[in-house]
Image (cartoon, grey):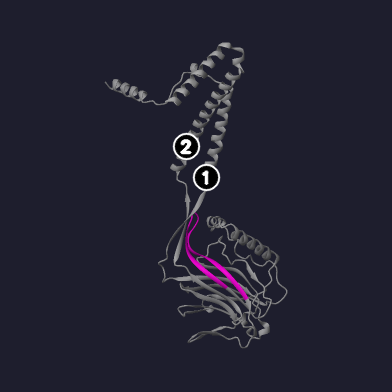
Amino acid sequence: MRRLSRRKTLSLVKELDAFPKVPDSYVETSASRGTVSLLAFSIMAILTILEFLVYRDTWMRYDYEVDRDFTSKLRLNIDITVAMRCQYVGADVLDLAETMVTSAEGLVYEPVTFDLSPQQRQWQRMLQQIQSRLQEEASLQDLLFKSAMRSSFTALPPREDSPTEPPSACRIHGHLDINKVAGNFHITVGKAIPHPRGHAHLAALVSHDSYNFSHRIDHLSFGEVLPGIINPLDGMEKIAQESNQMYQYFITIVPTKLNTHKVYGDTHQFSVTERERVINHATGSHGVSGIFMKYDISSLMVTVTEDHMPLWKFLVRLCGIIGGIFTTTGMIHGLAEFFVDIVCCRFKLGVYRRNEHAWRDCKMILYLSWYTQVIRTVR
């Protein structure tokens, strides 16, 4: 009984076989069909390889939502070199909430030489070239997000030589924890002192002739520092032509959550516009000499996620490529053979020149085809 049931099951499965089985004696091979088969297999192989490369690749997806975190602190990371001695300059932050954050809370004043060494100058040129390419091709930012945490080439390399001149510049580096409101980070003459109506700088003891706000921004970022991420002001260098020079940077900060295969962290992208002018009260150009970075925080938050094609979608696309090419090449080859037969039959070429019976059969087929077409037209 069991054997009978198995035989019935096997016979039922055989009846459900939907794939055509053509005996070898009924199959006719030709050089043209073999050529088309080789061409089809070659195209299948090439497209399969390209599809596999697309499957291995990833892309960045950007999602936008309202930033509901307004109570936490925002970290400001700074590495700026000013062409003045450290005892002559001071840096601090004053925001719209009238909260003053002094540089003593996290910044270090380091006497250095303003001119870079050959290796450091080469690093700066490379960084400036990357910045120019990022301005022209915004899609390169996706590559930087993917390569985050893989390298730290954005950090200024240490000096490989010993300067012979005494330090005449001041490197201000470190971080400050600021409120998530609009504010102004500035570097100007004199150390900052608290004031009931704001703050002031002790600049009376510094001569105007010693002012020199030529500066180089080696790094400026907001939030968590991620190696490999290049910020818009990294590598920026300004040389002052006058002593009373004012540099202004207007920054718009966008909170960003980065979620890739290599790193998950909170950072902040920002855009910047700049302006510089000479302070001359006689001509109506009022203000204070120094470096001023006025920042504002966007209410939108961007979530950057690295996506990958799922396996099922890759298999579906692969089946579509193989089946589509196989079917399309078969149809094209059949149509080509049909038109070649028509042309050879019409002008008695090839086998129809030597074989009179084949030519008569061909004429009959053409006549039937023409007659069928006429009948369809009349109907």
Q: Amino acid at mark 2?
A: Gly
Q: Quadrant of residue 276?
A: bottom right
x, y percentage for residue 156? 62, 66
Closer to the chain start, of discs 2 and 1, is 1
Marks 1 and 2: in contact by CB < 8 Å?
no
Q: Quadrant of the C terminus?
A: top left
Toward the bottom, the furthest residue is: 204
Separation of marks 2 and 1 at Cα, in angstroms: 15 Å
In magenta segment, residue 273: yes
Residue 161 on image: x %, y %: 70, 68
Which of 279/232 is in front? 279
* Pointer 1 local density, CA inside 10 Å: few below 14, some 14–19, many at least 20: few
Please state the horizontal and vertical placement of residue 22, each as a whole percent of the image: 46, 20
Secondary structure under tag 2 reads: helix
Q: How many marks?
A: 2
Mark 1: amino acid: Val
Numbered range of the magenta stretch: 249-276
Res 54 label: 1
Q: Is residue 277 magenta?
A: no
Q: Residue at 64% x, 66% y: name it.
A: 158
Asked if 294 appears above or below 15 in the picture, the reply is: below
Which mark is drawn over residue 375? none
Is 255 situated above or below 287? above
Residue for badge 2: 320
Q: Position of residue 359 (x, y in %)?
A: 56, 14
Q: Relative to 307, is 82 on the left or the right?
A: right
Chief SS of the magenta region: strand
Q: Secondary structure at mark 1?
A: helix
State which quarter of the image contains the N terminus. top left
Residue at x 57% of width, y 83% of height: 191
Q: Is residue 180 above or below residue 7?
A: below
